[in-house]
Image (spheres, helix red, strand yellow):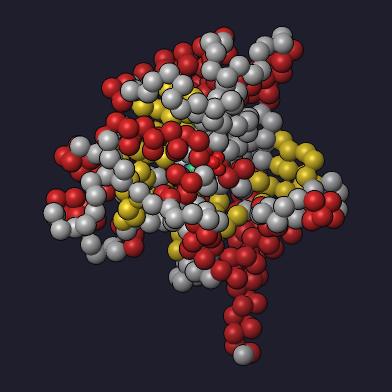
Amino acid sequence: MEEVFKKYESEVRSYCRSFPKEFNYAKGSIMKDTDGKEYIDFFCGAGALNYGHNNDYIKSKIIDYLNKDGIVHSLDMYTTAKKEFIEYFENKLLEPKGYNYKIQFTGPTGTNSVEAALKLARKVKKRNNILALMGGFHGMSLGSLALTTDIGSRGGAGVPLYNVTHIPTPYMFPDVDMINYLEIILSDDHSGIDKPAAIIIETTQAEGGVYVLSNEYLKGLRNICDKYDILLIVDDIQVGCGRSGNYFSFERADIIPDIVCLSKSLGGYGLPFAVTLLKPELDIWTPGEHNGTFRGNQLAMVGAKAGLELVTNDNIQDRVANLSNKIQEKLKTFLLDYPEFELRGIGFIWGIDVKDEQLATNISRECFNQGLVIEKAGRNNSVIKLMPSLLIEEELLNKGIEILITVIKELNKYQVTRLKSQ
Ligand SMILES: Cc1ncc(COP(=O)(O)O)c(C=O)c1O
């Protein structure tokens, strides 16, 4: 089965190594391989499938659009699909929340949105430096990669990654007031840190191992940015679009970023789509100054509007809050027997830090054997990351968690026995 991939596909491939089966069907939270075996999906395309696979409502809108020969590619020309997406996004999502952003359509992946945010922040503030948090992941193209901290990703750059200063994230030094730390490095004329154009954060570091930044810290960052004339960029590519409970992950802290990066589940159906939201006064771009052939992914815009309709009409937020509590309770109770592990998360993103790379790999692998797709994240890839669809049936959610619990029990028993016999 794997021969053709091994022979012809670059060694750079990665997720297929964790989940080495050929898939040919997916619906909701179930994927099937070519042998007909079913898997519960707790991976969700790394956050690109918040509404599950092949959601009927979104699919019907896309198929209607195709059947009518709606325009599919148009760069950034005016189209009906774009108009309808913009109107819905502004009037039904942003305005009720009191947000005033212009929308920049970037190339269709997350890293394109981050690149646009960086360019704009530097252009507006006429400064090179950007502050980013240790443990953050912001993409793989060179500007974004300079922000991203994991050594494996950075290793592929081939050139120096600069114009970024990384600062510790609060969980790294729990006894230090990290807002005070920032205040000091920004005001001290001997800190050696160039005044930044922006600070970029994920409100919950996802690839970094599911670390939820506190509301207090987020508010503190907003204040610091205001005080020192620095832009606050929230990269909501993975934990936005409802993943953390609210549509935007920063709502919980009652802060308003200057720039917001969105992608992944924004497209609704798993189609590539990204935007950068900017406060209107920042919109100093000249026409075409930042562009890209695939900014106008019309099918994704149709999917995005349908996805937004689901989120804004169907009380998904209440559902996520309710089920999130249940996930937390279940895992917390289970982990009472495993005090060495740590549970972290919010909404529909949870991480079990098993503090051991090999154990995490074994857990993910064995879960897969037992029909659960679940990935690892964080330092040494030692965090098992649960990211079910926001629309997963409760029964499937429970079944997935049961598989995970059973696997951890089994592997841990084995690990303990092995250690004793050494
Ligand atoms: C927070 C965050 N930012 C940016 C990206 C990059 O997105 P993409 O892989 O679509 O370029 C990711 C991808 O995982 C992400 O999680």
How many numbered discs? 0
At 53% from the left and 71% from the top, the residue drawn is 356
At 60% from the left and 71% from the top, the residue drawn is 358
**Most foreground residue, 267 or 273:** 273
At 27% from the left and 44% from the top, the residue drawn is 196
Q: Does residue 46 appear in the picture of this structure?
A: yes
Name the quadrant containing residue 117: top left
Name the quadrant containing residue 180: bottom left
Instruction: Report whether 19 appears left or right of 177.
Output: right
At 52% from the left and 54% from the top, the residue drawn is 157
Residue 271 at what x, y percent from top left? 63, 30
Q: Residue furthest bottom?
A: 422
Residue 285 at what x, y percent from top left? 37, 23
Quarter placement of the C terminus? bottom right
Instruction: Report whether 73 appears left or right of 263.
Output: right
Please determine whether, in this image, residue 86 is positioned above or below residue 208.
above
Instruction: Report whether 345 appears left or right of 50.
Output: left
Residue 244 at what x, y percent from top left? 45, 41
Q: Does residue 332 appear in the picture of this structure?
A: no
Please determine whether, in this image, residue 90 is positioned above or below residue 216.
above
Residue 236 at what x, y percent from top left? 44, 38
